[in-house]
Amino acid sequence: MAKDTLNIGLIGYKFMGTAHSNAYRQVAPFMGPALQPVMQVLCGRDAAGVSAAAAKMGWQECATDWREVIARDDIDLIDICTPSGPSHTEIALAAAQAGKHIFCEKPLAASLDDARAMLSAVQAAGVTHMVNFNYRRCPAVALAKKMIEAGELGEIYHWRSVYLQDWIIDPDFPLVWRLDKSIAGSGPLGDLAAHSIDLAHHLVGPIAAVSGMEQTFVKERPVAEAMGGLQATGGSARVPVTVEDAVAFLARFENGVFGTFEATRFAAGRKNCNRFEINGSKGSLVWNMETMNELEFYSRADEKAAVGSLAGFRLIQATDGSHPYAGHWWPPAHIIGYEHSFTHGVYDLLNAIAAGTPAEPDFLDGAKCQAVLEAVTRSIASSGWASVEAV
């Protein structure tokens, strides 16, 4: 008899761990995936913290050693929500060796070599693997993908994206792990621009070469004494910031598209402005996470309407049941939010595991993103253009 449940071991319980936990709670009643997720074990280093989180989010057990979770025969999927960096690689390699399916937060790894090692491990193990580039699964973005594939934009000319936040603009905000290169690997390049890179790959195509620049505006910050999500408290001692505060780069796509990318945590008033614009021979598309249910579309066909030009950007509310994912939730215009993108990802992952088909974006997509991140870093170091390595 085929198994109809999947036991989850989630490593990491704070910001992303909470988002993933909520997705496992919501996916079955609203979306009815082929496999029912069982929230078996939540793992974190702080026993009191992980115990409280497990009770709050509905996990059956908690643990403090991820190696013990991976070694358990009753765990089918390892979900990695630890801080980006070497921990992703260490956990994923062990999980693949143990034959577990893997769901990993972005960026996939701290280096392209690590990403390649992770990809090789999951391919050799034959397990399902997926990276949580969750913005792919906002209905408006998924609709944009369908429109591009249907030729609504014609030949693509431009990609431009910004990812703007302001949560560390205060120079007295403490040095949290995202500002520590040894843990995070980079600043907004890996944390924010990685999302933009994946969306560009998904919607437009592979990036061939980049030319970048970066800047750190605040050189020292107070030592963090307590952290949670994007909040922290600090002490009186100050330590050096070891990542960039802002990054920007030009990109040449393999198909000739001209691209620009910017990511910063110093854009006052911008809380999560993840925005892209795509211009083509037949029209343009614009999306912004801060109005995530809306897609702006300009069609050049409207310039030649029988009654005179009707040209202008039209606003599409991607909440109709005919739009990707939207039909699982509420009636049209009853909008959904950030957390739903995680639920959609879990839904697709569970169905892929049940069907024995590849999930996407997978570790290959994560490694391709990592290759662009490293090319940007090399470009900044050389003050010139850098080619993106093949994966």
Image: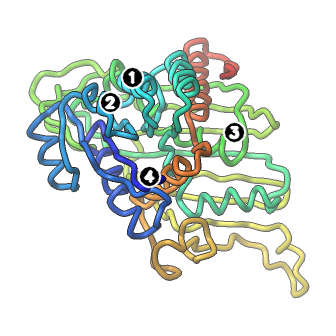
Q: Residue at x 18, y 31 (%)?
A: 64
Which of the two labelled residues, at mark 4 and mark 2, occupies the earlier sequence position?
4
Q: Is residue 42 toward the left or the right of residue 335 in the image?
A: left
Q: Residue at x 61, y 21 (%)?
A: 375
Q: Residue at x 12, y 22 (%)?
A: 237
Q: Are marks 2 and 1 in contact (CB under 8 Å)?
A: yes
Question: Between marks 1 and 4, how big is the CA–CA gap?
Answer: 24 Å
Residues packed near mark 4 inside 10 Å, few (<14), some (14 to 19) or many (20 plus): few
Q: Mark 4: which amino acid?
A: Lys
Judging by the rendered image, the residue that carries numbered circle 1 is 94
Q: How many marks?
A: 4
Q: Nearer the viewer, mark 1 or mark 4?
A: 4
Which of the two labelled residues, at mark 3 and mark 4, occupies the earlier sequence position?
4
Which of the two labelled residues, at mark 3 and mark 2, occupies the earlier sequence position?
2
Q: Which element carries disc 3, helix, strand or loop?
A: strand
Q: Nearer the viewer, residue 62 or 52?
A: 62
Which of the two labelled residues, at mark 3 and mark 1, occupies the earlier sequence position?
1
* Mark carried by residue 301: none
* Mark carried by residue 259: 3
Q: How is the image coloured?
A: rainbow
Which of the two labelled residues, at mark 1 and mark 4, occupies the earlier sequence position?
4
Judging by the rendered image, the residue that carries numbered circle 2 is 70
Q: Nearer the viewer, mark 4 or mark 2?
A: 4
Quarter assignment of residue 381: top right
Q: Is residue 326 toward the left or the right of residue 226 in the image?
A: right
Q: Nearer the viewer, residue 391 or 260?
A: 391
Q: Mark 3: which amino acid?
A: Gly
Question: Between marks 3 and 2, how big is the CA–CA gap?
Answer: 41 Å
Percent coordinates x, y for residue 61 in the rendering? 18, 45
Judging by the rendered image, the residue that carries numbered circle 4 is 3
Percent coordinates x, y for residue 302 in the rendering? 82, 74
